[in-house]
Image (spheres, helix red, strand yellow):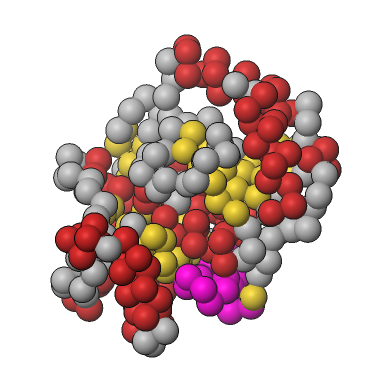
Amino acid sequence: MLGRRAASANPNLLLITLELWLVSGTVEDLLATAVEAAKRAGEIIHSGFYKTKQVEHKGLVDLVTETDKKCEELIFDFLKLHYPEHKFIGEESSAACAPVELTDEPTWIVDPLDGTTNFVHGQVFPFVCVSIGLTVGRIPTVGVVYNPIMDELFTAIRGKGAFLNGKSIKTSSQTELVNSLLATGTGTKRDKSTVDATTNKINSLLFKVRSLRMIGSSALGLCGIACGRLDLFYSLGFGGPWDVAAAAVIVNEAGGLVFDPSGKDFDITSQRIAASNPRIKDAFIEALQQSE
């Protein structure tokens, strides 16, 4: 077990232990277990996608359904059966006031249904997914993002590449901001200051990129970067680490970069994220800074 005490005593020990853990073969089993959990939850999402939903409001436009809760319970029960000693963080359990504490211990971070608004609107916008990430020493290490409506399974293990339905994926080779496709979201806050800041930033960026897309799922937006469908992505004030933990691994392993929109290092607990291929990162950060 990777302990907080050992890591704080010797910061390099954590990284060394992590690398040994990754080559031991154990990590392949972890990925397989996460994939199985995601597919089981995906069956529930797929079966409910075209049906009438029971919807609750966590905020003015922040929605949750019975499917979200059922999927999180299924995933946690399945993972705990295999790894009872691990830590667990989930969107719906956190929304129900369970404490969110990310430690150095192996921690599963789960969004059982990312893109709930898309799910509620049914056939209109089929961008929903299960997101299951594992951090070790607070480092995203295993990532699984599964869209059961489009049957797309994104997977990655730190240091071992990224894949879509078993085929290796890479980020785009775009080098010009003006030719880039940008994705973002509007978040769930609807107070005037937040809305003004959000729309002002988008307005500024639209003068510098080719076009803008809003997918409604941070996990799928990041996976779009990983497979080259999108060139740029950023999100501010999203729900929590469950939105990005899995996809951050996938982007990195596809040759992309994940970072804070300010240009600083990415902090999984910060609710701030940006991603791109390496060739366009600096220009993207400059554009984001100018949009403040």
In the displayed structure, would residue 169 be above or below residue 251? below
Is residue 173 in view?
yes
Q: Which residue is depicted at the point 74% across and 52% down?
A: 279
Taking 240 as reference, is 81 left or right?
left
In the displayed structure, would residue 32 be above or below residue 205? below
Q: State the image coordinates of residue 106 (x, y, percent, origin top left).
A: 27, 66
Of 134 and 65, which appears nearest the observer? 134
Q: State the image coordinates of residue 21 (x, y, percent, origin top left).
A: 35, 79
**Residue 213 is inside the magenta segment:** no
Q: Quadrant of residue 34?
A: bottom left
Q: Quadrant of residue 10?
A: bottom left
Q: State the image coordinates of residue 8 (x, y, percent, origin top left).
A: 24, 57
Q: Which residue is depicted at the point 42% across and 24% down?
A: 189
**Which portion, as a residue range, is magenta?**
150-167
Of 27 and 210, which appears nearest the observer? 27
Is residue 45 in view?
no
**Residue placed furthest toward the top:** 192
